[in-house]
Amino acid sequence: MSLFIPGLQLSQLFYEEVVSKLIQCPHAAALIGEGSEVLGYDQPRSTDHSWGPRLQIFVSTTEVGKVSMRVDSGLPDDFMGYPVRFFSWQNGTVQHHVHVTTLEDWLASQLRIQGPDPLTPQQWLSLPQQHLLQFTAGAVFHDDAGELTRMRGQLAWYPQDIWLWMLASQWHLIGNLQPLIGRTAEAGDLRGSVLIACTLVRRIMEMCFLQERTYWPYPKWFGTAFSHLAAAPAVGPVLDRILAAADTGSREQAVNQALIQLAERHNALGITPEIPPQIADFQVGINGAVRPYPVLNTGSYVEACRKAIADSAIARLVPTGAIDQLTHADDALINFTSWPVRLNDGYAQELKGSAGSE
């Protein structure tokens, strides 16, 4: 077996030295879609399945058949010591993995996007971040028309109003969880208190991705991707203290330290008026009840984000979050069910109802 070479580099060399010589029409070439190598996280372990010299070739509809035939007949048996034909889990056969298609068909099959028009709010809200990441990560090796590059730029991040509403939703999710750390501990449910704190760590990490305008990946690479964020050196050690805390008081103190960092990072974005972070006892909001659990003023950040949204229908939505905030959005759900499409319809109904309430 050859020495390990990262998949992106391998695929680029495969295109430049082999595949490009088989194509005689305008095209785009890239490695996008599924696979740890698309994210740049592949390791020697990754080579045990669905890994090797591979890429996508995008051509016009009239050229798909001709280019496919040239590729099928012109590829070598191996490249740089790696077999060119290897097992495909999608159809259960051994084949080469140079996928010749149109950009429109790839977007329709992989992202369920029809055509090049800008996405609607409900489409943005129901598109899993992993799918958006798979399209915008990886690398483009060649792009004659520039259409692939343009679409990757168009989907590189959420529109401002969608982003603001997702930030509001994330603050809401964090604010709902935080007082439960103290309440469960007070009730003697120490395991439950730790579990809530662990869930809150995940929510804090998600907020870091949102604040840095970076799509988060599925769980296998979530922590790895977080470690590359600008927030990781400061926020990461505090999250480690939350996870390792031996008592509720230490855990609550570390949570608030992390949340203050998030609040300061929010203010640095300049997307809302500055809001001073404040730690105070939890106000239940019913009958003037106040409980002795120190929490951040997350509600202030929720409202500030919603007030900054220009589209009143989006601003009026209950801050439940986009698909990845609303659900677990794992591989089975996003790739093998109709839930993303059904959520698209659900968000459309919520937006319609929200607009009608003005």
Image (cartoon, grey):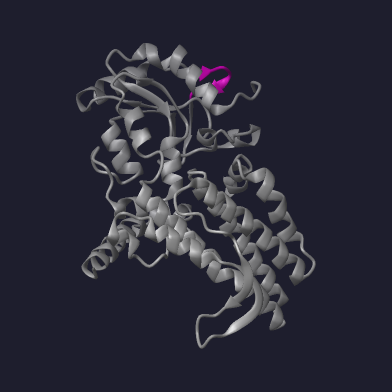
The span picked out in magenta is 77-84
Q: Is residue 83 above or below residue 103?
A: above
| Magenta-span inclusion, residue 82 | yes
Can you tell which quarter of the image residue 181 is in? bottom right
Frontmost residue, 336 versus 164: 164
Frontmost residue, 193 versus 166: 166
Q: What residue is rendered at 47% in x and 35% in y?
A: 137
Residue 151 appears in view: yes
Q: What residue is rendered at 43% in x and 64% in y?
A: 303
Residue 14: % across, % down: 48, 18
Q: What residue is rendered at 54% in x and 67% in y?
A: 175
Residue 326: % across, % down: 44, 62
Residue 8: % across, % down: 52, 26
Residue 117: % across, % down: 23, 40
| Magenta-span inclusion, residue 14 | no
Image quadrant holding the C terminus, namely bottom left
Can you tell which quarter of the image residue 201 is in? bottom right
Frontmost residue, 331 versus 232: 232
Q: What residue is rendered at 50% in x and 80% in y?
A: 285
Count of marks placed on residues: 0
Q: In the picture provided, is 246 more to the left or to the right than 162?
A: right
